[in-house]
Image: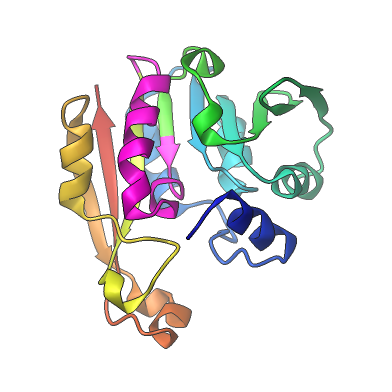
Amino acid sequence: MVDNQHWLDRWKENRIGFHEPAVNQHLQRYLPQFDLPRGACVFLPLCGKAHDIAWIAAQGYEVIGIELSQLAIEAFFEENELDYERLDTDRFGIYKSGNISLLQGDFFDLSNDDLGACNLVYDRAALIAMERHDRPRYYDHMLSIIPAVSNMMLITLEYDQSEMTGPPFAVPTDEVYQYYSDAFSINLLETNDIIDERPRWRKVGLTALSESVFRLDR
């Protein structure tokens, strides 16, 4: 079972293979296509200490992230040499530095008020961190908290789940359409075979691995 303690332990033990060493290439390629106005808000669920956070902020956007691990959030600010202020509420520790606000707490404790008027959701590692039986709740909660004007950039992985237990978990393309097509017009931007880029997963038994990038428009 992958619960909150699992993720806290992984950060504590530095078992963070899901953390990308650079800004995501798909983000850099496709974010300009959303044509967001300067100052627009981008929401990153389960953001960790991703390099993507600082990169998006550097493009002139407000960033709101949610992350369970205090270690991850404080590592982000330390590694990016950013001073921050922390405010504690009944649900979150809120870390703020310039146009970056990172909320330390549980994604499922977020409400619509917490995200204000965010224009875009960037989901690279949140949906694929959820086990299949948890994902319906994730889809429903995401749709309940994001503003009606929010579009989404979503990155998923797909593989034979019987070959690896996860995380990350396999998310079939048809599942994305099943849960999001009522709220969004969905465009599959690209799908790539990336098994050769992830040799450690081949070592654990994966024979194939594909990565898909979706654009979801209201």
The location of residue 147, given as percent across then percent down, is: 39, 15
Q: Quadrant of residue 123?
A: top left
Viewer-closest of 6 and 176: 6
The location of residue 133, given as percent across then percent down, is: 32, 50
Viewer-closest of 187 and 29: 187
Is 93 above or below relative to 132?
A: above
Viewer-closest of 162 and 85: 162
Q: Residue at x 81, y 26 (%)?
A: 86
Left or right of 154 in this view: 203: right
What residue range appears in magenta? 122-149
Left or right of 151 in this view: 49: right
Q: Quadrant of residue 141?
A: top left
The answer to whether residue 212 is magenta is no
Is 159 above or below relative to 104?
A: below
Viewer-closest of 81 and 118: 118
Q: Residue at x 34, y 32 (%)?
A: 152
Q: Residue at x 20, y 47 (%)?
A: 175
Is 89 above or below relative to 180?
A: above
Left or right of 95 in this view: 120: left
